[in-house]
Image (cartoon, rainbow, N blue to C red):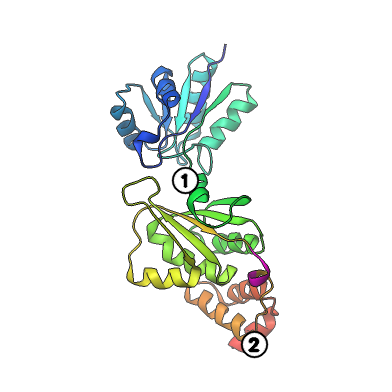
Amino acid sequence: MSGKLYVVGTPIGNLEDITYRAVRILSEVDFICAEDTRVTVKLLNHFEIKKPLLSYHEHSASHVSENIIERLQSGESCAVVTDAGMPCISDPGEDLVRMCRDLDIPVEAVPGPTAMATAAAVCGIPASRFAFEGFLSVTKKQRFAHLKSVASDTHTLIFYEAPHKLRTTLEDMLKYFGDRRISICRELTKIHEEVMRTTLSEAISYYETNAPRGEYVLVVEGAGEDNSNKDYTLEDAVKLAKELTEKGIKLTDACKEAAAVTGIRKNDIYSALM
């Protein structure tokens, strides 16, 4: 008889947010799969839980997944956790859940805090309908393609971002979204929790003199009449293309991206630049 995989939510900053059930399950399973065992062991030590830990992250070899599956099929039980929040969302644990489902291995959720839902609740921007977009790619081409694909989405958009990439992300959002309202949620549930509701342009100005610190959740209002039907001029398109080339994008690709955002013909943008 197969064991069971428990998907266990852990606190996103405040250890008091863990549930009684989560503590019990972590205490009862045979082993725990963790994104970063160094982070998880601190949580386990706090609640005096002693269980074998197995490192499971995006760089884990396929044999690690196979080992976990074999142990589950042999009857062992396992809890999968991430560093903070609900695992298996924008997280390598997603693949483990999929494999278990494919093999009819029982999977049970042990709900816990999630940064995206917490941010949606306190952001001050309507979020009854939102799209969770996770982290933007560090690869410029994929990053720009992602922003372009959601630029006309009327749902509120929620992103995760690290402090060292925050300024660039805000600048890129301004180019692709226009100057929308944004709620910048920092260090949620922690001592230095901060929620700043502002606009993209004002946020960029703020972080020119204030160094970003901590982990961020960005809640951006969806496209509406004010930001989805903007009439761009050739001058706007040329300016955008120039800014993209300054970020290392090839001239032809920059013109193509600027054309996609503004609706101005690529050849016209290229000719004006030349």
Q: Mark 1 points at which residue?
A: 115
- Earlier residue among tags 1 and 2: 1
Tell which of 104 and 116 is nearer to you.
116
Q: Name the residue under label 2.
A: 271
Q: The residue under label 2 is which amino acid type?
A: Ser
Q: x%, y% of residue 54?
A: 40, 28
Q: x%, y% of residue 264?
A: 69, 79
Residue 195 drawn in magenta: no
Task: Bin the neighbour count of mark 1 within 10 Å (Cα to Cα): few under 14, some 14-19, many 20 and up.
Answer: many
* Rendered residue at 46%/26% (across/down): 79
| Left or right side of 246 for 241 | right
Quadrant in which residue 81 is drawn: top left
Start-end of magenta stretch: 223-227
Quadrant in which residue 35 is drawn: top left
Task: Bin the neighbour count of mark 2 within 10 Å (Cα to Cα): few under 14, some 14-19, many 20 and up.
Answer: few
Mark nearer the viewer, 1 or 2 = 1
Tell which of 34 and 175 is nearer to you.
175
Q: x%, y% of residue 17?
A: 40, 35
Q: The residue under label 1 is which amino acid type?
A: Ala
Above or below for 171 versus 270: above
* Rendered residue at 63%/60% (across/down): 150
